[in-house]
Image (cartoon, grey):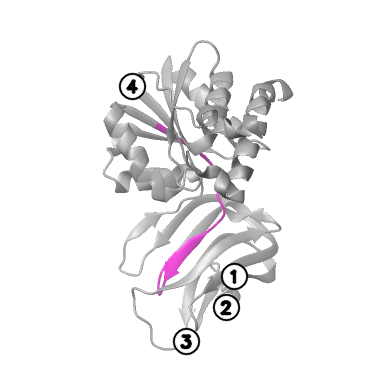
Amino acid sequence: MFVVALAFPYLAVNAPSGASVAVVEGWIPKEHIPAVEDVIDSLGYERIYVTGTIRPCSYTLRIRDTLVLDLTHERSGELVVNACGSRGAGFVVMDGEGVLLEDSVADECQPYRTTLDRRVGQVLITPSFKGRVQEEWELLYLASVTLDGTNLHALQRNTIIHRQEGSVESGTPTYADVAVAELLRCGHDPQAIIPLRTLNAGESRTWANAKLFALRASRDGIKKVDVISFGIHARRSRVTYRTACGAGVQVGVVSIPDPEVGPGFWWHNVKGWIKVLKELGGVPSSYLVDGLE
């Protein structure tokens, strides 16, 4: 317990290298991306790489919004839409030939299932509503969409959202896409951002992201970089990126504060203990993962 009690400053390490290049871990909760942008501005990074693995097929839709997922190739199987929404709301799932699944939703998310009797290459999901509806209402929340147990984001070739007012925006199939979108919303120069989407993560998402960045760093001739991580995950991130990049790249780290697990109070709640113990266990494994691969 004494070792754990002293672990926080060891885990939530801040040790920037003075690099002009940073790699942002895209899984950082999007509400904390403005803090990431503040760090980028204050430390003067000129080029930003953003890593991220595939995220659940999760979106919030308003009336007349349509989520369109083009699949890599035609597929059939059991389609499961895990959804919830406003009272009176529902959804319609279609392809180019007609309706695949249609149902109303409750205020608690639950799965809605159908077995596709034909192969589909495109899936379109739009909310429905019984009664009068205001255009600004967020009617439908998709928690996940799977086909034969596989996240639909892992099967997609392209994802877009047609919004009610006529605009078209890109979907966010990976956490890298989410973080990039938030950085752009903060006003960051899009020419300075390079997304690195990790499509096959395996058991360790941090390691998969670090390996992908290491390949890109070698190609781009990067010799010094800072990893922008979150809270007490920072040390494990630096260890993993150092291992992936090798001795030829100097890796620093910057930790964005986690308000749930902060210095001076994290031991007051069970969540704080769980997070700290998890990271203490994860740091040694980060040294071993290269050998295990």
Q: Provide the secondary structure element on which disc 4 rests.
A: loop
Mark-to-mark CA distance, 2 and 3: 13 Å
Residue 36: x and y in percent read: 37, 39
**Circle 2 sits on which residue?**
106
Q: Provide the secondary structure element on which disc 1 rests.
A: loop
**200 within the magenta span:** no
Q: Provide the secondary structure element on which disc 2 rests.
A: loop
- In this view, 3 is above or below 98: above
User: Residue 109 got which mark?
Assistant: 1
Tell me, yes or no, whether the two marked residues, 2 and 4, touch with CB atoms within 8 Å.
Answer: no
**55 within the magenta span:** yes
**Amino acid type for the residue under numbered disc 3:** Lys
User: Residue 20 got which mark?
Assistant: 4
Residue at (46%, 51%) from the top-left corner?
172
Tell me, yes or no, whether the two marked residues, 2 and 1, touch with CB atoms within 8 Å.
Answer: yes
Residue stretch in magenta: 49-66
